[in-house]
Image: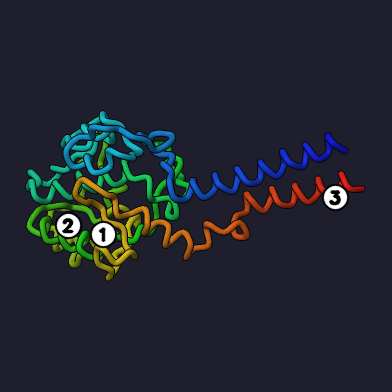
Amino acid sequence: MFRSCKMLKAIFLSLVVASMAVKDDVLNVCMEGKHHKKQPGVEGDLHKQCEPWKDWACCTVNTSTEAHKDESYLYNFNWNHCGMMTEKCKRHFIQDTCFYECSPNLGPWIQKADASWRNERIIDVPLCKEDCEEWWNDCQNDLTCKENWHKGWNWTSGINKCPVGYPCQKFTDVFPTPQSLCEKIWSGSYKHTTYKRGSGQCLQMWFETGKNPNPNVTKYYAEKMGLLGVAYTPRISIFIHFFLASLSLLLT
């Protein structure tokens, strides 16, 4: 009987730990990407635009440095595929890269990815209205040839070039609105919202160094999506059934 009680206690503790782990997975997680760390942690000194995440990041110092280069080893992606991108426009793409590589607050929007270079991606991350508008405003006079930057490039040279039949155009011709820019450029990774910064209902792609405003927003959406409750978590449901089955066997 004593051994049975110890076994039940062990099973119960496993259930509790698993429940906590699921919550951590949603609210504090690094996606399985090409350069992401396994777990978020303190970095101390991230580079320039990535600095706001230094207290708790999914990126390394080296990744943050590479994020600022025109053709970095991260993805060999060339921002200047239609001539030199202006600095004010490029700043947003660097912030976008830092957000993607460094943020531990994207859990509710992480999904499996069918790609050779990553196992997971983000879908429909709700960005604040200002983030999309400022990005669009600062890039509207720059040039590009594609609305979906995830795929369809000519990679024969090792870096992305415009494919045949895709002429360079102003950003405003390719992306007529801030919404089209945010939602189309990375094939649905981001969702344009009407919520403003500080509303508690949108994520900021970038913020001044200091307190990260995004964890509370992530928690809000995780609760809204039913990702924090045990009843809604298949992994925990399995543990509950296992616990009850074990209890039944031990009591018979």
In this rendering, the answer to whether 69 lies above or below 240 is above
Judging by the rendered image, the residue that carries numbered circle 2 is 135
Q: Hey, which quadrant is residue 132 in on the image?
A: bottom left
In this rendering, the answer to whether 216 lies above or below 75 is below
Residue most extreme to the front: 2
In this rendering, the answer to whether 149 lies above or below 160 is below
Residue most extreme to the bottom: 194
Residue beneath the point at 21% across and 32% down: 65
Dot 2 or dot 1, earlier in sequence: 2
Is disc 2 in contact with disc 1, using a CB cutoff of under 8 Å? yes
The secondary structure type at the circle numbered 2 is: helix
Judging by the rendered image, the residue that carries numbered circle 1 is 182
**Which dot, 2 or 3, sits closer to the camera?**
3
Give the CA separation, mark 2 to mark 1: 8 Å
Judging by the rendered image, the residue that carries numbered circle 3 is 248
Q: Identity of the amino acid at label 2?
A: Trp
